[in-house]
Image (cartoon, rainbow, N blue to C red):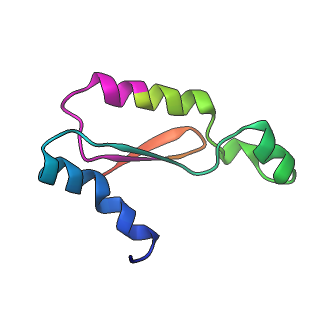
């Protein structure tokens, strides 16, 4: 296996090879109590709220035209990467 960047091609690879939709959500840090306790001096405004992740998952599930995407999230702001 290569570096962590190899995962970027996984959704598109499955879409092409297996002929079904595959997408991924890649949040930066998720804003949950355990992370806040572990990193108390961090800037929480850059972390992704769990609700934002749910919203993106629902969007990906509801839109059959979207496939092979990696949604990278920082501060709850999604950015589509193909």
Residue stretch rendered in magenta on the structure: 58-72
Q: Is residue 36 above or below residue 61?
A: below
Q: Is residue 34 above or below residue 54?
A: below
Q: Position of residue 70 (x, y in %)?
A: 36, 49
Q: Nearer the viewer, residue 40 or 77?
A: 40
The residue at 51%/28% (across/down) is 54
Quadrant assignment, res 17: bottom left
Quarter of the rendering occupied by the N terminus: bottom left
Looking at the image, the residue that sits furthest to the bottom is 2
Quadrant assignment, res 49: top right
Q: How many marks?
A: 0
The residue at 22%/51% (across/down) is 14
The residue at 29%/61% (across/down) is 9
Q: Is residue 79 left or right of residue 36?
A: left
Instruction: Reply yes or no: does residue 54 show up in magenta.
Output: no
Q: Is residue 60 left or right of residue 73?
A: left
């Amino acid at each position: 296996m290569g570096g962590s960047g190899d995962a970027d091609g996984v959704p598109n690879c499955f879409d092409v090879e297996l002929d079904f939709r595959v997408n991924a959500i890649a949040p930066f840090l998720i804003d949950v109590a355990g992370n806040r306790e572990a990193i108390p001096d961090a800037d929480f405004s850059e972390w992704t709220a769990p609700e934002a992740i749910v919203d993106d998952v629902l969007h990906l599930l509801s839109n059959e035209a979207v496939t092979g995407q990696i949604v990278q999230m920082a501060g709850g702001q999604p950015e589509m990467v193909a």
